[in-house]
């Protein structure tokens, strides 16, 4: 079984969405964790848009990267540039991957416009996670 860590700035949106999809796609072939270099709590809109897609992340917690320093990760995926810049402080032999997804929490406009941005980012993360599992965990 592979250990996967998804790392973001606040562990509130992008890393939570990615954790949900990676768990769904990898099944019992991976233990998936998410963390932030800070903790901001799980964003309610992230929970809402994931439920729309059939994945419940409402029980996820916002975790600091330091909580996982003793886990031997096989993969660390940073999902924002800030986390990637601060990630070298995380001691690991894991293979590192990076994709700078837009931050849906910074979306502005009407409620519908903000949710539309969350859904757009969710789709980007879903496709990335599907490909990641197919290329790195499925075999």
Image (tube, rainbow, N blue to C red):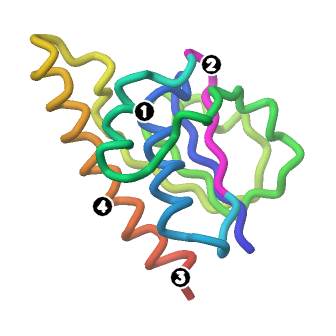
Q: Residue at x 56, y 15 (%)?
A: 40
Q: Earlier in the sequence, mark 3 or mark 2?
A: 2
Q: Which residues are magenta?
A: 32-40
In this picture, residue 43 sits left or right of residue 39? left
Label 3 neighbour load within 10 Å: few <14, some 14-19, many 20+: some
Label 4 neighbour load within 10 Å: few <14, some 14-19, many 20+: few
Question: Disc 2 marks which residue?
Answer: 38
In magenta stretch: residue 108: no
Which percent across, then down, holds residue 68?
80, 40
Q: Depth check: 75 or 2 in front? A: 2
Task: Label 4: state its secondary structure.
Answer: helix
In this picture, residue 67 sits left or right of residue 100? right
Q: Earlier in the sequence, mark 4 or mark 2?
A: 2
Label 4 and label 1: CA atoms lie apart by 18 Å
Mark 2 or 1: the one toward you = 1
Q: Residue at x 28, y 33 (%)?
A: 102
Label 1 neighbour load within 10 Å: few <14, some 14-19, many 20+: many
Question: Disc 4 marks which residue?
Answer: 127
In this picture, residue 30 sits left or right of residue 84? right
Mark 3 and mark 4 in contact (Cβ < 8 Å)? Answer: no
Task: Label 1: state its secondary structure.
Answer: helix
Question: Disc 1 marks which residue?
Answer: 47
């Amino acid at each position: 079984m592979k250990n996967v860590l998804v790392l973001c700035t606040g562990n509130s949106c992008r890393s939570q969405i990615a954790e949900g999809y990676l768990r769904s796609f990898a099944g019992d072939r991976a233990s998936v964790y998410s963390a932030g270099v800070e903790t901001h709590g799980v964003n309610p809109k992230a929970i809402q848009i994931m439920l729309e897609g059939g994945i419940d992340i409402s029980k996820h917690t916002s975790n600091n990267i330091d909580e996982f320093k003793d886990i031997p990760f096989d993969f660390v995926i940073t999902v924002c540039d800030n986390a990637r810049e601060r990630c070298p402080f995380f001691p690991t032999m894991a293979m590192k991957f990076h994709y700078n997804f837009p931050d849906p929490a910074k979306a502005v406009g009407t409620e519908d416009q903000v949710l539309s941005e969350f859904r757009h980012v969710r789709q980007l993360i879903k496709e990335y996670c599907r490909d990641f599992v197919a290329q790195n965990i499925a075999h």
